[in-house]
Amino acid sequence: MSRATIEEVATAAGVSRSTESRVLNGSTAVSPEALDAVRDAIARLNYVPNRAARSLASRQTYAIALIVPEDTTRFFGDPFFASIVAGITGALGGSDYLLNVLVASDDPGNKMTSFVRNGGVDGALIVSHHASDAFIEQIADVVPVVYGGRPVRPRAGDYYVDVDNVAGARAATEHLIASGYTRIATISGPLTMLPSLDRSQGFRDALRAAGLTPFTEVEGDYTEESGAEAAAQILKLGTPDAIFAASDLMARGALRTLRAAGLDVPGDVAVMGFDDTAVAASTDPALTTMRQPMYLQGETMANVLLSRLAGGSPEHVTILPTELVVRASV
């Protein structure tokens, strides 16, 4: 069955093609009678607008890029990204925009950058950016951008959605201290990323306020394997009474190493995570962790970008709350 054309809809509605176009483009310069007639004809003929034709007419692509400067293994293996994408698609569901996901730890030959700069999308959402990701600045030069997390190299007028990582990590560490732990190690994320630096800062702040010093600090990369390796490095220095891992995946890796070493959690070593992904509830024991609202982050980022594309004036900075979730690992 062939798709109805714009001319057939106009004929069925008894209006001119220009009147129908105004209705489709959301113009209010039509009579209520014409508006009702066009909507009725669209419903009867099951008319679907041609996106390519609309793009040519409006010089818009009706596409948004989600740019993730990571390798595909981490993107598809970390439930954090799944929640962010779910929030973004939830926000875009009621709009005309489609989501293009562009995943690359770097941009060889400027392939991704050229796609965006040559008009491939109307705007971009950028998450998980590192200090070395200079190519994202070239993208921000040509299309509206909203960052997930504070930009590594901030510029006037940036828009971003984040959680207070310093406060979240400080609260997580304070919970460990209040539970009686004093020899606390941490497994940070990559120190090329601001969330990692902020969580490490919050960890140190809490210890300093309690008159304590870190048992040790080991850098991971937010993967489970890096958490396992970091925990092994920690145990070479002795046995802490608690470990704060800056992600649930790294905490799960640490649990694996501790179990292999014959240590009980939390009897010998308590373990705290960060994120509250599905991983946290599935470990044995279930992880005490600091929840960040990942779905809401993705949803808010998309809504800020949609507002910008529509000519609105959203807030430049949105900070979402974190929440301590107590389970069995502490």
Image (cartoon, rainbow, N blue to C red):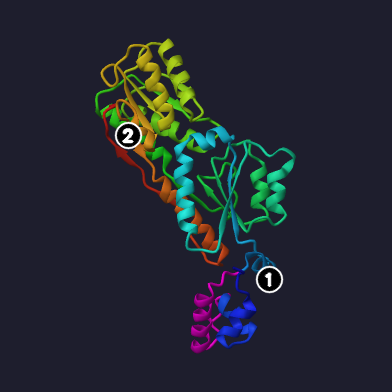
Query: What amino acid does circle 2 point to?
Result: Ala
**Residue at (60% x, 43% y) in the render:** 153
Q: Which residue is mark 1?
A: 57
Is residue 214 visible in this depiction of the protein? no
Farthest right residue in view: 109
Instruction: Give 193 or 4, whichever is nearer the viewer.
Output: 4
Q: Is residue 62 above or below residue 47?
A: above
Instruction: Give 316 or 243, whichever is nearer the viewer.
Output: 243
Instruction: Give 132 or 296, whichever is nearer the viewer.
Output: 296
Query: What amino acid does circle 1 point to?
Result: Ala
Mark 2 falls on what kind of element? helix
In the displayed structure image, the side of residue 219 where residue 166 appears, left or right:
left
Q: Which residue is mark 2?
A: 281
Residue 223, position as x, y percentages in the image: 48, 29
Q: In the image, which residues are magenta?
A: 25-49
The image quadrant that residue 13 belongs to is: bottom right
Instruction: Give 259 or 152, whichever is nearer the viewer.
Output: 259
Residue 204, position as x, y percentages in the image: 40, 29
Is residue 147 visible in this depiction of the protein? yes
Residue 319, position as x, y percentages in the image: 43, 49
Q: Is residue 44 magenta?
A: yes
Q: How many neighbours does mark 2 have within 10 angstroms: few (below 14), some (14-19), or many (20 or more)?
A: some
**Residue at (56% x, 60% y) in the render:** 97
Q: Is residue 200 magenta?
A: no
